[in-house]
Image (cartoon, grey):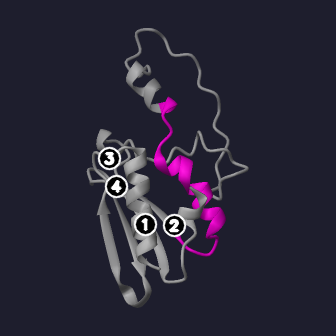
Amino acid sequence: MSGKYVFSKALKELRFHHCQTSDHSNAIRYDHVSCDSRKCAVPTLPIPSPSPLPIHDSRRRTDKWSSHDANRSFLTRAYPTMKHHNPHTPILIREAMNIQPRVFARYEFGKEKMADLQGLDDKAIEDKVSGLVQASQ
């Protein structure tokens, strides 16, 4: 995987757009809680341990959310590797309500390419991002 994420000088920026609440962005979502702070370039704040919730509380986590936490998203897995190999290339993560997950690559002379990531699994997202990165060479 690391060879795929060594960017050329022609790639000026990699930008991920996704919704922080919708299910269609689950595969791309960046989970800063599960990212090891020693490996990530993004600073994380310590999060206090949650207090046990009463049984009648509707905010209790369901099995759906537990399975989501078990499956790490693409950005949680790949961001530290991409940033390690390309420390001077901006890798931006943009969250906004009700937008489709997409990745944009900006190259020299203002040229941009976009890839739609909706409905893709982790491997397919990796292939799309690798395709955009390889297009810069």
Label 2 close to label 1 by CB (< 8 Å):
yes
| Disc 4 secondary structure class | loop
**Residue that numbered label 4 is attached to:** 96
The kind of secondary structure the magenta stretch mainly shows is helix
Residue furthest out toward the right:
38
Q: What residue is at 64 percent from the left and 66 percent from the top?
A: 85
Q: Marks 4/3: CA distance?
A: 19 Å
Across and down, in percent, residue 59 comes to 41, 22
Across and down, in percent, residue 134 comes to 45, 72
| Disc 3 secondary structure class | loop
Q: Marks 2/3: CA distance?
A: 20 Å
Across and down, in percent, residue 25 comes to 34, 46
Q: What residue is at 40 percent from the left and 72 percent from the top?
A: 105
> Vertically, is 78 above or below 34?
below
**Residue that numbered label 3 is attached to:** 120
Q: In this view, does 91 lie to the left or right of 17?
A: right
| Disc 1 secondary structure class | strand
**Residue that numbered label 1 is attached to:** 15
Query: In terms of sequence position, does the residue under pointer 2 or pointer 4 come before the other?
Result: 2
Q: Nearer the viewer, residue 65 or 51?
A: 65
> Vertically, is 132 above or below 102?
below
Across and down, in percent, residue 109 comes to 40, 91
**Neighbourhood count class around disc 3 (C-alpha, 10 Å): few under 14, some 14–19, many 20 upward:** some
Q: Marks 2/4: CA distance?
A: 17 Å
Residue type at numbered disc 1: Arg
> Vertically, is 65 above or below 53?
below
Asked whether residue 95 is in view, the answer is no
